């Protein structure tokens, strides 16, 4: 009986979403589709953009409309355009960017109209001096080297951690995703080398140096650079 009631609730939710839907343009991996979407809840985040911060929004997309050669599963970086506004599909916190709910995908979008991005943590991005290399004062420091970006605002998202045994000792590692506006990164460094460091100036990670672990990539909209980083363990 409980399964019947649950199925009825899912069916009713799908019908209500379709009843209040609006037309939008969905783009992913070069495929453009016209779809019907239903607006869900707004998502609030601690931005640093003053009185008019970027907005997050949940949109529901019908599964049977996300079809090209085969079914399309919404992924991070997909874009949505409707009513003169643009949105980009991104993961917020530990939640996935899209979840299947009945006949719809529940998708978390960040509004990117006008190029606004998420920003709440002040950092420098540096390529450190090589081992044994000295700065102009004859010193070696983790903050010395080639500056890719100086005092820019980014978003730092914790993505879980792990432990490994090195030399008989347990070493903890914490993984992070760091998102920056492409406009704040020097054009020469749109692909940031893996030896780079993100030096955090403010917030709960202030004073920490995050080690870039993988090649960075720009979003589909071309406005955001993503760095996968690690804190702890071996440098």
Image: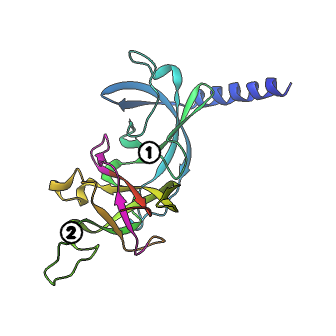
Q: Nearer the viewer, residue 16 or 9?
A: 9
Q: At 42% across and 74% down in the image, what residue appears?
A: 206
For the point 29% across and 46% down, the residue is 218
| Near-viewer residue (129 or 59) | 129
- Asked which colour scheme the image uses, the reply is rainbow
Residue 146 drawn at (x, y percent): 18, 67
Count of residue discs? 2
* One can see residue 1 in this view: yes
Give the residue number, with chain letter if any, for mark 1: 90
Name the image quarter holding the N terminus.
top right
142 left or right of 45 in image:
left
Decide if residue 53 is in sight here.
Answer: no
The magenta-colored residue range is: 206-225
Image coordinates for residue 23, horizontal then vertical, percent: 44, 29
The tag earlier along the polypeptide, 2 or 1, is: 1
Q: Is residue 146 left or right of residue 163?
A: left
Q: Is residue 59 left or right of residue 126?
A: right
- Circles 2 and 1: CB distance less than 8 Å? no
Mark whose residue sits in front, 2 or 1: 2
Q: Which residue is mark 2?
A: 129
Q: Residue furthest bottom?
A: 137
Which quadrant would residue 185 be assigned to in this image? bottom left
Indicate whether 165 appears above or below 134.
above
> Is residue 220 one of those drawn in magenta?
yes
Q: Please, what is the dominant secondary structure of the magenta stretch?
A: loop
User: Which residue is rendered at x = 36% and y = 48% of the image?
Assistant: 112
Residue 82 in percent (x, y) is at: 40, 37
């Amino acid at each position: 009986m409980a399964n019947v009631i649950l199925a009825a609730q899912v069916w009713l939710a799908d019908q209500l979403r379709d009843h209040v839907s609006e037309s939008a343009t969905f783009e992913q991996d070069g495929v453009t589709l016209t779809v019907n979407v239903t607006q869900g809840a707004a998502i609030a985040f601690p931005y640093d953009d003053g009185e008019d911060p970027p907005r997050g929004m949940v949109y529901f997309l019908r599964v049977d409309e996300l079809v090209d050669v085969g079914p399309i599963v919404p992924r991070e970086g997909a874009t949505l355009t409707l009513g003169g506004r643009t949105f980009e599909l991104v993961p917020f916190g530990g939640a996935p960017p899209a979840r299947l709910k009945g006949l719809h995908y529940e998708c978390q979008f960040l509004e990117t109209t006008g190029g606004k991005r998420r920003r709440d943590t002040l950092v420098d991005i540096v390529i450190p001096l090589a081992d044994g290399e000295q700065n102009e004062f004859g010193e070696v420091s983790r903050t010395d080297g080639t500056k890719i970006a100086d005092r820019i605002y980014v978003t730092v998202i914790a993505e879980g951690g792990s432990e490994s045994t090195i030399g008989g000792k347990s070493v903890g590692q914490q993984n992070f995703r760091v998102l920056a506006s492409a406009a704040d990164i020097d054009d020469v460094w749109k692909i940031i080398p893996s030896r780079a460091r993100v030096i955090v100036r403010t917030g709960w990670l202030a004073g920490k140096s995050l080690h870039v672990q993988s090649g960075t990539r720009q979003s589909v909209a071309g406005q955001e650079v993503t760095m996968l980083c690690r804190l702890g363990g071996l440098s």
